[in-house]
Image (cartoon, rainbow, N blue to C red):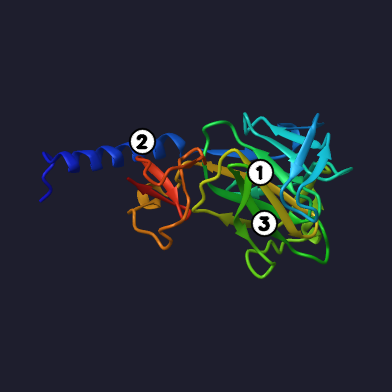
Amino acid sequence: FINFKSKSMKKIFTLIAAALMTVGVNAQDYVLQGGDNATYATATGDFVTPIGKNPGETITNPSSFTCTTAPGITCYMLAAGKAFSNGAYVTYGGTEMRTFKLSNGAPTEIDLPEGVTISKVEFIGYSNDASNDTWIAQMGMMVDGVYQDVYTNDGSKDLITVRKEHIVKDESNRDVCDVEPGVITIDNLSLSGKVFLKNGGKQPCFVINLYKGDATGINGIVSESSKNENAPVYNLAGQRVSKDAKGILIKNGKKIIK
């Protein structure tokens, strides 16, 4: 039996209830896709990429991309002379969507709305190359002005093997994928602010689903004990906080309650 009259127990269940409310509100996704949903333009100003061939490289007036199905989110192609463009249509989960094309190996910056935390990312699409697969080689975020990886892949896992030969013309002369698209799912995340990713392989064409909050429910919340007691601690906005901070925090990539 649980004594709900205990002040400590009341406090714990209040925090859990708050966590569940947060999950309920945030368990929603943004869809980054091309076609009529997308606006491709040139951004103004200098952007610094923390990843890629030359970390710290400044890109002036890069290509930008916004999407009506992802209000408040803007993407930037951090490579000189490169630009986003439309890809073929894919059907996933019974829904037809149009992919957009990233640049080979060029970092992409995704600016999330203030206060939004992303717990899961899906990359849905194909490689627009007849001979090579594609994958996500690196993904991370800025924390206190320092880039931190949350995912890396040397090409030995999570490959999208659907290639250009599966892109055909339909009766309306549209480019469509005639098989189920490839999917890469990266979860157990806590991404906020400026997120960066870089593809491996060739010719990535994706729809990107961004899931807010903890898409799997309260399972993402763990006790204070962790594999690295000296790991830095962050709040749900991705800001580094004192190890004495209270509430729902992020440590070792997991949610904890203090």
Instruction: Give percent across and percent down for residue 199.
Output: 73, 56
Q: Residue at x 60, y 50 (%)?
A: 122
Instruction: Give percent across and percent down for residue 83.
Output: 84, 41
Q: Is residue 31 above or below residue 233?
A: above
- Residue bearing mark 1: 96
Bin the neighbour count of mark 3 within 10 Å (Cα to Cα): few under 14, some 14-19, many 20 and up: many
Does the image show residue 71?
yes
Q: Secondary structure at mark 2?
A: helix
Asked whether the beta carbons under mark 2 and mark 3 sit within 8 Å of each other, the answer is no
Does the image show residue 98?
no
Q: Earlier in the sequence, mark 3 or mark 1?
A: 1
- Quarter of the image for residue 59 reads top right
Q: Quadrant of the C terminus?
A: top left
Per the model, the C-alpha gap separating discs 2 and 1 is 31 Å
Mark number displayed over residue 138: 3
Q: Secondary structure at mark 1?
A: strand
Q: Earlier in the sequence, mark 2 or mark 1?
A: 2
Q: Is residue 252 above or below residue 22?
A: below
